[in-house]
Amino acid sequence: MNKRVNFYSVIIGTELLNGRRKDAHFEFLNQELLKRGWEHKASFVIEDDKELMLKIFNLIKSDEHSVMFSFGGIGATPDDFTRQIAADAFTNSQMEFNEEAKKRIENRFKDEAYPHRVNMAYLPIDAKLLKNIVNDVAGFYLEDRFFFTPGFPSMSQSMVLEALDKHYCCSNIKKYRKTVTIVSSENDLIEVMKKIPTNLEFSSLPKIIGNKRKVVISVAGYNQDEVNLAFQLFLDFCLENKKEYVLEDGL
C-alpha cells in the first residue's frame, strides 16, 4: 500500500488508569505496525466516559488519513459505551442488529444469548465483522479504517492481525532516517535545529555519559534528498566547531 496512513489507537478502560489492570494493547499494535512499515500517529488511553470517547473519535475522524484501532467497551454491560459512541461519531447514530453477528451469538450461547448478550450484535449500520477466536462474539469495523475490538487481548490481538493483514498488510512508502550522536550540549545545536524543515521528522535526545554531554540527533522523512540536506547541516556544524560525532545511519 503506497498511500499515506495515520494510525491511531484508542484504549478504553478506567481500570487501566486507576491501576487495576495493565495495558497490553499499545505494545502489541505498535509492534505489528512497525513490522509492516507503519507507525503510530497517536495513542489515547481514556476512561469509560461517553463525552470524552466521542470527542476522541471525532478528532480521529477529522484526519482524512486516519486509521483507528479502538480497544474495549463493546460488551453487553451498562458501562460498555463503544458501540453507541461509534455510531454517534461515524454513522450519524444509526445502528442495526447485524444478522451475522447475531447468529454467531445465538449459536455460541443458545438460550443464554437473550436478553443481554444479543445486544452485542447491535452495531453501527453497515458494520463489517472481525472474528473473535475465543467466543465468536464479533468485533466490527467501519469504512475499512475504523476498527473496534474487545478489551481482552486474547480476543483483540487476532482481530488486529486480521484487520492489518486484510487492509493494511504493508507500506510501500519508504521513510529515510539518518542519526548521529554528537559530543555537544543541546543548547549549542539549537540554531541548527531551527533550520530543519517542518515537514521532516526531527528529534534531539540528550544524554550524559561520564562528564561528557552528548546529543542523539535523528532526521527522517519520505524524500531522501531532503533528509540528506537537513542532516548535513549537523555534520557541517560539527566540522566547523570541531565537535566529535558518530554516525548511526538508519536508527
Image (tube, rainbow, N blue to C red):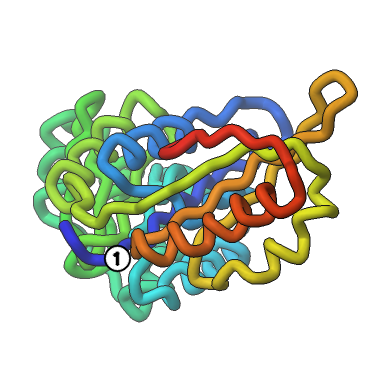
Please state which of residues 23 and 14 is positioned toward the viewer in this rendering: 23
Picture quadrant of residue 13: top right
Q: Amino acid at mark 1?
A: Arg
Residue at 45% from the left image edge and 43% from the top image edge: 72
Residue at 26% from the left image edge and 41% from the top image edge: 36
In the rendering, at what x and y percent does residue 88 appear?
42, 73
Check the image and report above or below for 23 versus 170.
above
Please state which of residues 167 and 112 is positioned toward the viewer in this rendering: 167
Q: Where, quadrant-wise, is the N terminus in this rendering?
A: bottom left
Can residue 52 be seen by looking at this rendering? yes
Please state which of residues 240 and 119 is positioned toward the viewer in this rendering: 240
Residue at 44% from the left image edge and 60% from the top image edge: 227
Check the image and report above or below for 114 versus 210.
below
Check the image and report above or below for 247 versus 73.
above
Residue at 28% from the left image edge and 69% from the top image edge: 95
Horizontal side, residue 68 vs residue 57: left or right: left
In the rendering, at what x and y percent does residue 189 appear?
76, 55
Please state which of residues 157 and 190 is positioned toward the viewer in this rendering: 190
Can residue 48 be seen by looking at this rendering? no
Check the image and report above or below for 68 versus 205.
below
Residue under label 1? 4
Picture quadrant of residue 83: bottom left
In the rendering, at what x and y percent does residue 94 appear?
30, 75
> Which element is circle 1 on?
loop
